[in-house]
């Protein structure tokens, strides 16, 4: 309850909030760029539909929901300063939303990891080169 620490905590809270916003936007753009690359590879129609569904999932669960939650209070400072009054919040993050985002991330990561493996079976490379590239992509699982 030391009042001299309060400005440091407020500054930390602000930078933490700002880092969350930047991270969420960066991850969404990264996943969108992977999807764009997968669409260029011209897989089967079914796989293209799966990629488009993953684009929708990334947009809804990994971009819109978190960004709207992080900007869900007004005035703006109330988003990182929980003691700010008067505080009006319309968006609240929930445990269910966190689980949905986690499941969405796992599903999209599996789709993105599997695509290059499928693509490798269609290109003419030596078996040793294909095996090496597959091992590299499989290392992305953990």
Image (tube, rainbow, N blue to C red):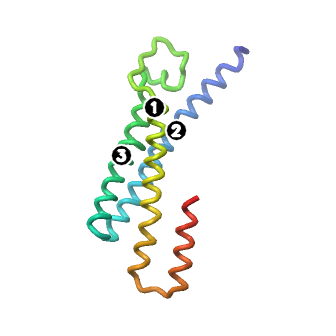
Which comes before the other along the chain, label 2 or label 1? 2
Tag 3's secondary structure? helix
Q: Are marks 2 and 1 in contact (CB under 8 Å)?
A: yes
Which comes before the other along the chain, label 1 or label 3? 3
What residue is disc 1 on? Answer: 70
Tag 2's secondary structure? helix
Which comes before the other along the chain, label 3 or label 2? 2
Question: Residue 115 placed where, x, y %?
Answer: 41, 67
Residue occupying the point 56% across, 71% down: 136
Crowding around mark 2 (Cα neighbors within 10 Å: few <14, some 14 to 19, many 20+) is some
Residue occupying the point 39% across, 36% down: 65
Which residue, as the protein is rendered here, is positioned at the far left? Answer: 45
Residue occupying the point 53% across, 26% down: 80
Question: Residue 39 placed where, x, y %?
Answer: 32, 64
Q: Height in image: 41 above or below 69?
A: below
Q: Height in image: 110 above or below 81?
A: below
Judge from the rendering whether residue 36 lies leftward or rightward of residue 21; answer left or right: left
Residue occupying the point 28% across, 64% down: 46
- Nearer to us: label 1 or label 3: 3
What residue is disc 2 on? Answer: 20
Q: Quadrant of residue 36?
A: bottom left
Q: Are marks 1 and 3 in contact (CB under 8 Å)?
A: no
- Nearer to us: label 3 or label 2: 3
What residue is disc 3 on? Answer: 59
Crowding around mark 1 (Cα neighbors within 10 Å: few <14, some 14 to 19, many 20+) is many
């Amino acid at each position: 309850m030391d009042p001299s620490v309060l400005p440091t905590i407020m500054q930390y809270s602000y930078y933490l909030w700002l880092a969350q916003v930047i991270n969420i936007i960066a991850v969404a753009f990264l996943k969108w760029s992977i999807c764009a690359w997968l669409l260029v590879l011209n897989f089967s129609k079914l796989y293209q539909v799966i990629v488009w569904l993953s684009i929708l999932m990334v947009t809804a669960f990994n971009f819109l929901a978190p960004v709207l939650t992080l900007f869900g209070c007004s005035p703006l400072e109330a988003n990182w300063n929980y003691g700010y009054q008067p505080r009006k919040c319309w968006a609240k993050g929930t445990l269910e939303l966190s689980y949905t985002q986690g499941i969405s991330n796992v599903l999209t990561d599996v789709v993105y990891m599997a695509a290059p493996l499928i693509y490798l079976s269609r290109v003419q490379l030596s078996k040793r080169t294909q095996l090496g590239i597959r091992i590299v992509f499989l290392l992305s699982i953990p």
